[in-house]
Image (spheres, helix red, strand yellow):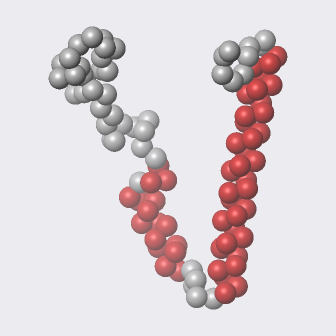
């Protein structure tokens, strides 16, 4: 079991505990990166003919569309958080 990070900066480096993060922690694991999803993606990719120029064009268009959608969702959520912070009278960004 990892020990918590020591905030005592006066202790010598050998006695300071280090922060260890378990890669198997349920909140830190990515379900899209699980072996099951990887195998499913491989099976789907095996069925797609990437040698056909039309299919490759559609895959590229799909990829760009997903990236644009992700960016749009990011900006929408950021806008909502900023508007909520302003409505509550809190500053957004670094404090000065």
Give the quarter of the figure containing the N terminus: top left
Comparing 29 with 53, the one in front is 53
Q: Residue at left 69%, top 24%?
A: 93
Q: Is residue 76 above or below residue 8?
A: below
Q: Residue at left 73%, top 36%?
A: 77
Residue 6, horizontal then vertical, whole percent: 30, 16
Comparing 3 with 45, the one in front is 3
Q: Is residue 53 above or below residue 89?
A: below
Q: Is residue 96 above or below residue 45?
A: above
Q: Residue at left 44%, top 54%?
A: 33
The quadrant holding residue 89 is top right
Give the quarter of the figure containing the C terminus: top right
Residue 55, horizontal then vertical, whole percent: 66, 82
The quadrant holding residue 59 is bottom right
Q: Residue at left 80%, top 18%?
A: 86
Comparing 96 with 7, the one in front is 96
């Amino acid at each position: 079991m990892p020990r918590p990070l020591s905030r005592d900066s006066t202790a010598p480096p050998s006695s300071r505990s280090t922060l260890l993060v378990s890669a198997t922690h349920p909140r830190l694991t990515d379900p899209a990166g699980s072996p099951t999803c990887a195998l499913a993606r491989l099976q789907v990719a095996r069925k797609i003919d990437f040698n056909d120029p039309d299919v490759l064009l559609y895959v590229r268009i799909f990829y760009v569309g997903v990236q644009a959608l992700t960016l749009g969702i990011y900006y929408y959520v950021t806008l909502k958080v900023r508007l909520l912070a302003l409505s509550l009278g809190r500053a957004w960004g670094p404090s000065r």
